[in-house]
Every structure is written in structure tokens, then in C-alpha cells.
Image: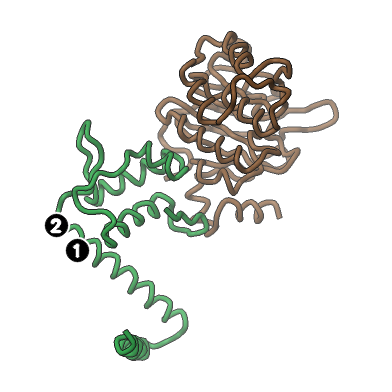
Amino acid sequence: MQLNFNNPKPIYMQMVDEVKKALARGELSPGDKIPSHKERAQMSQVNPNTVQRAYQEMEREGLTETLRGQGTFIRNDPALLQTIRSEMALAAVKLFIEEMQGLGIEPGETERLLRSQLYDESKEG
Amino acid sequence: MTAIDQSPTMIEIKGVHKRYLLKQALNGIDLQIKKGSIVGLLGPNGSGKSTLLKMMAGLIYPTSGTILVNGREPDVRNKQQIAYLPEIDSLYSWMTVKETLQFISAFYSDWQVDKASLLLHAMELDERQKVRNLSKGMRARLKLIAALARKVPLVLLDEPFSGIDPMSRAKIIHSIISEFQADEQTILLSTHSVKESEPMFDDVIFLQNGRIKIHDSAENLRSEFGCSLENIWEKVYA
């Protein structure tokens, strides 16, 4: 797990993102059991309170559910994967748009560049 | 969430000054530390870190001001509630590792034998070795075992990483995180090794010239400065 302490995004949110990415990539599946927050803290060498906060956040977002006495599981919801993928895709697009705006590039130009690059890559691929 | 939230207070310090014969070590410290957190005490040499920790341990007293640990003024009696790892090496060189731990355990009714042997294993120390034959890093590991094998609400670690190898440092950090009981323990740790210890901290205190320069949660500071504690350190003490 790659945590970046120079990223202004809080560590607990970075940990939530890691789980989401693992789901999007198929390394984790709905219904899978994930390590307890204590185990997770030991594995990643991160403050147990921070890990606990990440687990609370995942529960709050409906990403995981905790079954008493059994542990924490990725919520067994087939729609979950789709939700997370679109959520992460949207975030990536927003980041891209922000970068382009930062460069002073007009939306029309951004769209044109994106289309032409996608076209080039589809030909190459 | 701010650094000082609704959790009950473990340490409360008000207007504390400490004057040694020739040096003003603490210059008006006001500080609250909540229960259940791992707090990093950061600052250059001579900024007052050790003085503050010794005061919390009840080894020295403020020249003026008040300090309460778990609601009481620290003194010899409530040492039973505090595990203190001194910066200096106070181990007897002629004892073996095993004898050292047995010797220390005799002072404390809260000593956890099973935890001590667990830590011994995790830290990869050979209990038959004589202290005099241990490397500096190995002695640092042994000192940490002595502090963490006790079941106490407050653990004070003064420079547990100073001058030791990266491997020992990693082992020590691992053990602190593994053994930390968030619901019943508070750990204060002074260090220069900000990079390695950063992931451990809930809150951090930056000291300078006997004063608190910054006290906030690590997450707040990172989002405020937009960088890691390690880089904040460079900005604060530039």
C-alpha cells in the first residue's frame, strides 16, 4: 500500500481509496473479508486510530460492513463495483479538467485534444 | 476534527516554566493531551523535549505552573501509572537480557510476562546475551521492551530511535503500533526521526526554545501545510 504523507489528502482517505482501487482492479471482490483494523495497522505501520477512521469511513460510505464476531467484509452488493468505478472515473476526469484549466486551455480545446489523443491511441492499440 | 477533541484528558499542563541553574528550559507551556493517542514531541536539541517528558514522569518538578497526569500531580506514587523510557542507557552491562527484564519486572506490579516474551521475540533479541555484548540498536530494543511490557495508561518514550540502525528503528515502530492499546493508553514520544515515525502519530507538538510552536493533529497539519510532517519540520525550524 502506498501512502503519501506529502499528499494533502488525509491518510485515512488514502487508505479508503486503496481499497476502492483494489476493488476496481478486481484484487478485491464484493463479499471478501478484509483484515481487522488492528491487523491493518500492523501491516501498514500506520497509527491504529487513523486506520480505525478509514474503516469507519468505508462503513459510512457503504463500502464495507462489519459482522459482529466475524470481521469486516466488502459489502456483498453487485452494484457496488459499478458505483465505485464510476465514482473513481469521475474523480479522474475532474482532476484532468482541473489540470487543463490550470494550463489556461479552453473547454473546446480540451475536448478536441482528448478526442484526438483517444483516436491516436485506439489506432496504436 | 481538531487536535483536542472530546476525548478525556490524559495530561494537562498550565503555565509551566522550568529553570535549571543556568538555563531556562521551559518558557510557559500550556498543553492538553487527550487519552488514546500517540503524540509526537518534536524539536531540535535543547528545545525542552526531555525536560517536558521528565516532568510528566514525575522525575523533575516545574519551577512554576501546574501539571496534572491522569488528574494528579506526578510524583513517586503515580509512577505506577507511567512507563518512562529515558534517553540515557541505564541498563546493567553484566546482566543478560533475561536477567535485565526479570530485574525490571520486580519493580512493577503491572509487568506482563507474556507480553515481555512476545516483544522479545518480535524484536529478535536473544535473552541469553549479556547487555555488554549488545549493539546500541539491540540495547534500544531492550529498553523499549522494558517500557512496553508494562500495562500502564501513559507511556513516555524519550528519543527511542536516537543513534540506532534503521532495522532496529523499524522493529521498534512496528512494536509500538502493535502493542498500542488505543482505548486505554496514551503514548508520548520525542524524536528527530520524523520521516520514519510520521505514520505513527495522531497529534504532534513542535517545541522551540521551551515553548510550544505548534500543537495539532498530524492530518490537520498535513492538509494545512500541504506536505508531510518531515517537510513541515523543515519549514518550522528554518
B49 above or below A101?
Answer: above
Residue at (29, 56) in percent of width and height: A27
Name the subunit of mark 1: A
Q: Which chain is brown?
A: B
x%, y% of residue A76? 16, 50
Disc 1 packing (10 Å; few <14; some 14–19; many ≥20)? few
B143 above or below B43?
Answer: above
- Circle 2 SS class: helix
State whether residue A51 appears in this view.
yes
Side (left or right) of A76 relative to B83? left
Whether marks 1 and 2 lie on the same chain: yes
**Where is mark 1, residue-wise?**
A82
Q: Which chain is green?
A: A
Name the subunit of mark 2: A
Residue placed most toward the observer, B76 or B155: B155
Amino acid type indicated by mark 2? Pro
Q: Which mark is residue A78?
A: 2
Alpha-carbon span between mark 1 and mark 2: 8 Å
Side (left or right) of B73 relative to B134? left
x%, y% of residue B70? 51, 21
Residue placed most toward the observer, A10 or B166: B166
> Looking at the image, which residue sits at the far left?
A78
> Looking at the image, which residue sits at the far right?
B22
Q: Are marks 1 and 2 in contact (CB under 8 Å)?
A: yes
